[in-house]
Image: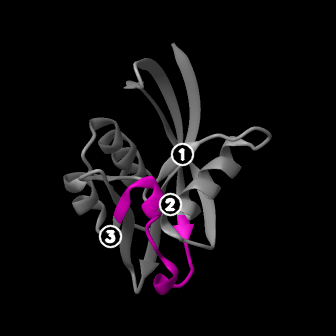
Amino acid sequence: MRHIDAGGGVVFRLDRGVCSILLIHRRGVWDLPKGKLETGESIEECALREVEEETGAHPLTIVSSLETTRHIYSENGNEIEKTIFWYAMKHTGELHDLSPQEEEQINGLAWVSPEEALNRVGYENLKTVLRRFNKKGYGC
């Protein structure tokens, strides 16, 4: 079994006291942005790079680590174990700079409330990450 490390983020912003979380829509499922670690980068650098590539969101600031998730999937007949290191990331940039990374099959982005994010995400491990985010608060 091959192992992959990845980094991802729960991207949030506060606007007039209202907290929103950024979701991506990939392959028919609402998801959180994440991606594979590249040679020579730290997991934090990976998480920031991947989130920015997949969403166009910048600047981003890592506020804290959140959770580590693991899952196994098949790709081209091979089993892969993926470990994802999740971070809370604050977005303070312009909203018009956002754009989904279509080459990664991301066809939509949405800013939603923390409660709506929990309802929309399509994978149980993401609900665990979002519950940890909600428990920590961050002004949300």
Q: CA distance from mark 3 to mark 1?
A: 19 Å
Residue furthest to the left: 119
Q: Position of residue 58 (x, y in %)?
A: 60, 73
In front of the other: 87 or 39: 39
Image disc number at residue 110? 3
Amino acid carrying label 2: it is Glu
User: What element does badge 3 sit on?
Assistant: strand
Residue 88 location, x and y as percent?
52, 55
Residue 79 placement: quadrant: top left
* Residue picked out by circle 1: 35
Q: Nearer the viewer, residue 95 or 135?
A: 95
Residue type, mark 1 in image: Gly
Q: Is residue 124 left or right of residue 11?
A: left
The CA span between labels 3 and 2 is 13 Å
Instruction: Specify the segment rendered in magenta.
Output: 90-107
Give the crowd class for mark 2: few <14, some 14-19, many >=20 residues within 10 Å: many
Residue 123 percent coordinates (x, y): 28, 40
Going from N to C along the chain, the mark reached first, 3 or 2, is 2
Q: Which mark is residue 54?
A: 2
Q: Nearer the viewer, residue 45 or 54?
A: 54
Q: Are marks 1 and 2 in contact (CB under 8 Å)?
A: yes
Query: Helix, strand or loop at disc 1?
Result: strand
Quarter of the C terminus within the rendering: bottom left
Asked whether 68 falls inside the magenta stretch, the response is no
Label 3 vs label 1, nearer the camera: 1
Q: Which tag, 1 or 2, sits closer to the chain's start? A: 1
Image height of 51 relative to 84, above or below: below
Q: Is residue 106 magenta?
A: yes
Q: Amino acid at mark 3?
A: Ala
As drawn, the residue found furthest toward the right would be 40
